[in-house]
Every structure is written in structure tokens, then in C-alpha cells.
Amino acid sequence: MKFLVILLFLAIIASLGSGLFFLVKGKGDNKGMVKALTVRISLSVALFVLLFAAWAAGLIQPHGAGF
């Protein structure tokens, strides 16, 4: 479970870097940046759904921030 969450998080970071690359190096063509944004949003939603499903199944437990 941890491995999958970390893998998705790293993929989100990679997509963020890809979007930055297309933003800096793009020559008026936003197709690469839009694709990177779409991938990043999809991965973020997938991570949220995965975490919510794991919580609902009892695989993970939320905890307080120590307050």
C-alpha cells in the first residue's frame, strides 16, 4: 500500500516537472502543458480515491497531528 502511494506521489511530481519543462521551453504550443496538467489531475484524483478506499476498507487509519 505504501509503495503504491509513494509511486503515485512520485508520478505526480514527475508530471509537475514535465509541465514546468513545457512552460519554460514551449514556443506558444500548449499541448504538452495541457497534457501534463491532465495527467497530474488524473493521478491526484486516483491517489485520493485510493487513500479513501484504503481508509474505508480499514487498511489505513487517520491520526491527529498531535494536538
Image (cartoon, helix red, strand yellow):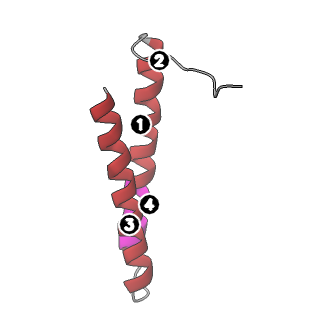
What is the quadrant of residue 46 in the picture?
top left
Closer mark to the observer between disc 4 and disc 3: 3
The span shown in magenta is 32-39
Residue under label 4: 37
| Image disc number at residue 29 | none
Q: Residues within 10 Å of mark 2 (few under 14, many from 20)?
A: few
Residue under label 2: 55
Are circles 4 and 2 on residues that touch, CB within 8 Å?
no
Residue 32, compared with residue 4, is above or below; it is below
Question: Mark 2 and mark 3: span between their CA atoms?
Answer: 29 Å
Residue 65 position, x and y percent, is: 64, 28
Q: Secondary structure at mark 1?
A: helix
What is the quadrant of residue 6 in the picture?
top left
| Image disc number at residue 47 | 1
Question: Mark 1 and mark 3: span between their CA atoms?
Answer: 18 Å
Considering only order in the chain, which callout, 3 or 2, is on the residue closer to the N terminus?
A: 3
* Residue 48 horizontal side relative to residue 4, left or right: right
Q: Secondary structure at mark 2?
A: helix
Residue 9 position, x and y percent, is: 38, 45
| Image disc number at residue 17 | 3
Considering only order in the chain, which callout, 3 or 1, is on the residue closer to the N terminus?
A: 3
The image shows a total of numbered marks equal to: 4
Closer mark to the observer between disc 1 and disc 4: 1
* Residue 4 horizontal side relative to residue 64, left or right: left
Residue shown at 40%/89% (left/top)?
27
Q: Secondary structure at mark 4?
A: helix
The kind of residue on which mark 1 rests is Leu
